[in-house]
Amino acid sequence: MSLNRARLRRAVRRDTFGVDVGGALNLVGALLRYFSLTFLYPAAIALGYDEPAWPFFAAGAITAVCGFGLERVTRGRDRIGPREGFLVVSLTWLLAAGFGSLPYLFVEPQLDNPIDALFETMSGFTTTGASVLTDNEGISHSIAMWRQFTCWLGGMGIVVLALAVLPRLRVGGRQLMEFEAPGPELETLTASVRNSARRLWLLYVGISAAEILALTLVGLFRLDERMSLYEAVAHTFSTMATAGFSTQARSIEAFGAASQWVIVLFMFLAGANFALTYRALVLRRPGALPRDEEFRVYAGFLALGSLVIFLELVAEGVHAGEEAVRHAVFQAVSIMTTTGFASTDFNLWPAFTALVLVALMFVGGSAGSTGGAIKPVRFLLLGRLLRRELDQTVHPELVAPLRFNGALVDERTLRGVIVFVVLYLAIFALGALGLMADAARVNLELSPFEAVAASATTLGNVGPSFGFAGPMGTFAPFSDVSTVIMTALMWFGRLELIPIAVLLTRAYWRA
């Protein structure tokens, strides 16, 4: 009898709020409990370098206790549907950033402000790579590796990792994966979402291992003596996640040309669709890449951006020869894939190259990659939609369904693309206006272009901006209000706006 009454109360609560908040929180608690294990890796690094490991053990214990407690107070409500998925994914990422900031707060003087610590952690997990640190090389090995590791975890996705290992996430798993995975629609590798998540993570780990090996060999063969095993692991974490955090104050400029070319290759791979890469590398179907329309657009944007920057650098006498080619290709790939590494201080480049780099911030990596921003597939579909509208203006009776990779694109998908792009541009504009207004409030020298770049780079999860927040600079001069704005932009950008925007509507909470 009491059991029936409990079920009735849960049903009434769900009807009242329109979403099973308890069920969502129960799953978030479980995810936090498993997330607490990630602190063991930096703890091991700390022990290896004879550094304090207690901040990581303490952060892991606090995270585990909070996750377990959240599960206990919501037990019996462990099944969720697509509607609860929005809340689960949004809360998981926000809380992961919150708990992930604890080691910084415990021992890092540069991040003793909770807002700065949250910014740094959100920047890592969302693979943005923007930093408020003023002395990258002054932090311990374990704290530095934790920064890099947060990038790598966030690259393929915390929830996607959970889908690969937790049986209880089978219910609503496809929706959870779609809400977290970047791009307009999910392309699974198998009929089972769990198996798809496993294969994506295995591919991610495999390519990461290949980059670690390649960079380590560069160091061993003395092509770049600064590239040690530690540096190889740290920069692989950031490269594969298209994040851009570096252990060095001057980013990849601190390393030699050989290391830079290796990183260019893996940034390119990380910015491509992992499902396509899986077919090309694992299933041995290399033709899958050039046949894909988005991949061709992705490669075309990168080639065009690299060429334009190269010509400008040579014309202005900034660089010449191989150096001009390397820096042009490196920065075009780094910015468009939203990695954010810097092979040189492009803040000092001519104004036209700055405009090109900001434009590439909006393109981003492919759908299904670890890259952020709008994505080439959306630009492709918008271009075809515009062409159809122009054709139908001339010939109103024309019926012209749109296709992508030979398949028909339904009108609902096209509406979703338009809504996403409009919402993206609106949030970007509001972010830039907010940064300008706050800079005026605190008398911070911030030009309109720098505000635009800062909003674009945080919403697109790119990393470096221009001005004092350039590739060799820091976001530290921004006030706490601006830091909160940019933290929110990173959170919105990584989850592609919709899961968080939905939570702000009345319809979501109504029955």
Image (cartoon, grey):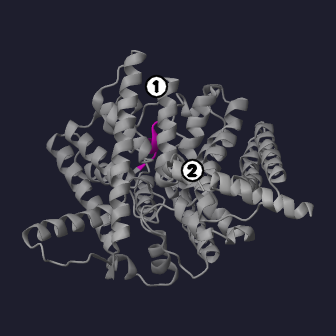
As shown in the figure, which amino acid type bears the numbered disc 2? Cys
330, 157: nearer the viewer: 157
Residue hosting label 2: 151
Q: Nearer the viewer, residue 27 or 206?
A: 27
Q: Residue at x 52, y 25 (%)?
A: 480
CB-based contact (under 8 Å), mark 2 and mark 1: no
Estimate the spatial distance between the alpha carbons at disc 2 and disc 1, rounded to whole Å.
22 Å
Q: Which residues are magenta?
A: 250-256
Residue 43: x %, y % from top left: 76, 46
The image position of residue 503, as x and y in percent, is: 55, 49
Quarter in which the C terminus is drawn: bottom right
Left or right, 198 with respect to 500, comes to right
Count every numbered label the image shows and give the total: 2
Residue 496 placed where, x, y %? 46, 54
Label 1 secondary element:
loop
| Type of amino acid under label 1 | Phe
